[in-house]
Image (spheres, rainbow, N blue to C red):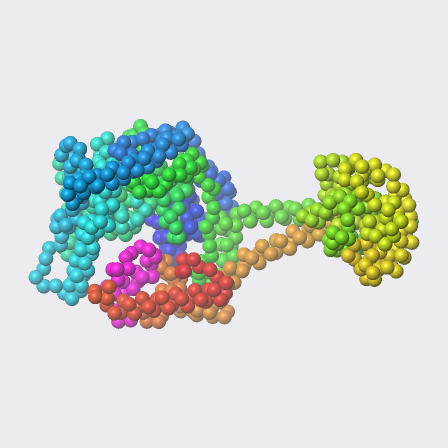
Amino acid sequence: MTTEVLQSMLYRGSEVINDIDCVVFDEAHYLADPDRGYVWEEVIIMLPEHINIVLLSATIPNYKELADWVGRVRRKKVYIEITYYRPVPLNHYILSGRQMVLIKEGDNSFDRELVKKIFFDAQIKKDKASANKKGKFLLDKKKGGDKVKQDGAKEGEEQKVLDQPVDIDAIKSQIALPEKTKLTANEKKYQKRAKRLAKKMKLKHQTGGGGKFNKDHNDLKQNVSLIVEKELYPCVVFVFSKKQCSELCMGMSGIDALNSRERSRIKRFIKKSLSKLEEKEREIYQIREMQYCLEQGVAYHHAGLLPILKEIVEILFAEGLIKVLFATTTFAMGLNMPARAVMFMKLEKFNGKEEVFLQASEYLQMAGRAGRRGKDDTGYSLLYFEKADMFRHQGIADEMQDMMDVKSGSLESQYKLTYRIILFELSKGDNGMEAIFKVMKSSFLQNDSFKEKLLEQQIIKNLEDKLDSHQELEPTTCTAEEVKEYNSNLLELFNLNHQWVSSASPKTICFPALIEFTMDGYNYHIGTAIQNDKANKALVILTTDEIETCPYDEETKKEAGDASYNIVPYKHVTKSFANTLKTEVSYMDSVRLKYSSKQDILEELETIDKDSLKEPRAKRAKKGKGRGKKGGGGGGGAATGGSSERRNELIQILKSSPAFSDPKFAELLKLINSQATTQKEMNKMVRSSKEDTLLKNEEFTSKMQVLKELGFMNKEGVLSEKGRFAQHISSADLMILTIFVFEGGFVDLPDEEMIASLAMTMTKAGGGNSDDLHPDYLPSSFFENKTLLEEIAGSVIDCEEKFGVKDEQKE
């Protein structure tokens, strides 16, 4: 059964679940499927503890991570069994001009240059053919001919058959329904539709628009014929369109892959399988079409096939009576049906928005069907490109190499909190909320978060231990409060310094400029600022002093390739002498640095009396205070008025503090800073943990608001009749279909119209033909329901947008 069926059984509380001992999940990498992956996670989480599970896959690189999650969720030991080799080697070929060109053999490297050459040669042939055709056309014009003569077919009756265009009318005549003398009104409508579709198909294959189809189709027939000749069957041809599956299969007329004995077995099996159907059911067009294909040894398989036909095809394929099977990816994912060879019609698929190349895991999953253990020595993966695709994908070699040589990407969770799981858990009663949060926490999506949470808890514990382990130091000549006060004032000074330097204009600080700075708050240094490093909010300073590490910022002392360079953050700069000297010309002339070379600057620093610059601090501060209104002063830079005065005031307070002269001052300051830093880190970790929890709850809260707004539950979270009905819908959008039912969409509808309306809630965009929706053969109620469904879908999307819920499927 599919995981969706098992999920429904779990939701319904089926008694069969109690009798199950083990569940095997084949192709477990389907957990990463964007559309269905969340279903797999829900089933693994919801299965009762007494049930053992087995997961099988060939394309999960992060299998240890998956096993860790399964073990945590199931609360059981997990055993991993690994096979490091393919039992049957897999070779990869490109089909080119009825030839199989080997591009990768087994585990050897992909032949990138050969692939590029194949596509390059194809382009040259195209150019030559185009030139020859043009010259031939001109020659025939001169001779008075109206048509361009085409190249003659190769010798042999078989080649003539293969080169014949597909005769759709002939095929239709063989599988046509028996005519009736009297038709009902509905049968007349459907017959009218069938005639119009047949006319369209005939035009498609006879007009210029169908010419390309015929040409490429015949090229495909030749390659399929090559597969039959080399006996590379059974072969699965992967097609990424249900519609193309049947079309391509029907176009294989003329390829007789069966002997008389095999054909007889197929006919007997079909007759026996269909004997349980009524006569009118056996005349269904899809059944007649499939019967015609099967008798030639070909068939197709996709999700839209009638269940009885699926069973017939799968049994005959397993028996080896179907030589070539056209199938969608569902055949590779859901069935254990190995073949000798697989063929890819293209290496791109539509992802709902655009055509994208297959991922390595997708390609390997499908190609891995080739090679039957115990029967084949080698598996064959055949890449067929329509000629137009070959010219369009001249740079495809890189993508192909990624698919064949690169290991598949890590399996990532696609879990999402669905309305159905919310309704299901809330229907249980008071413990519904807790059950929902338990499911959310148990998802594979939260596995990394779970590990991160454990790590965060360990870090917080370590930080708490670090705080407890800090030794308490008692000051010698001052009190602990005075040290804390000093620390507080120093941090304020750092903040004002940062504001001052970061707001300074180039005119305020002229480079090179004499700068006073402190890294630890009590040792002051003189250096030359040579550059403003705005990215790091720091000045690049040259100094001859030995610089200590700042207790407030462990990375402030950064060396720029030389021990004499220091990157000093703005907050540690306390004075710009160049700015002060702008108003004291005589003093400025004696200390301003005018040299460009580093050595000259360092030599000049050695000659400067740094103590004389530090000593008159109070005197210059008073001068600066008096000149503050003019924009200069001891604070320098852009700091004027109150900020400049406060900086100067803080400097004096710090220098005169009793803590500054305490013998243990440096140790005390580092201890206070270490404690503050540790506490800050711990607070940050705790806050981050809380924010993460709030973020996870946000989606749940938003979807609860949507359900309440649309009447699926009351304000207290108790399910309404709508909510109880909706939780049992699994195959369609439960919200849209439920509202449709409660608004009377099915009232007084005959069975066939009810089925048509249900189909509209399940059909994906792009799967059909808008021309088929013709009012001539569809009842008016169909279009009324179509309009109603569109209005309901619009209202649901509007409600979701109102509460911040995004549902891409509805859009």
Compared across the picture, whether 445 is left or right of 401 comes to: right
Q: Is residue 311 left or right of residue 427?
A: left
* Foreground of the two, 732 or 51: 732
- Residue found 31% across the figure and 30% down from its top: 101
Magenta stretch: residue 755 in it? Answer: yes
The residue sitting at the left extreme is: 181
Q: Nearer the viewer, residue 43 or 575?
A: 575
Q: Report the number of discs.
A: 0
Inspect the magenta stretch and tell me whether residue 481 lies in it: no
Residue 636 horizontal/vertical position (percent): 81, 54
Residue ranking furthest to the front: 142
What residue lies at 25% left-to-right and 65% top-to-bottom?
Answer: 753
Image-based side of 156 in relation to 539, left or right = left
- In the displayed structure, 503 sits above or below 336; it is below
Residue 276: x percent and y percent?
Answer: 17, 51
Q: Residue at x 33, y 30 (%)?
A: 102
Q: Is residue 680 visible?
A: yes
Question: Can the viewer see residue 344?
Answer: no
* Relative horizontal placement of residue 464, taking residue 123 as reference (left or right): right
Give coordinates of residue 292: x percent, y percent: 16, 46
The C terminus - image quarter: bottom left
Image location (x, y in percent) of residue 787: 33, 68
Above or below, 333 against 756 in this view is above
Residue depicted at 77% across the width and 55% down the height: 500
- What are the residue bounds of the magenta stretch? 746-773
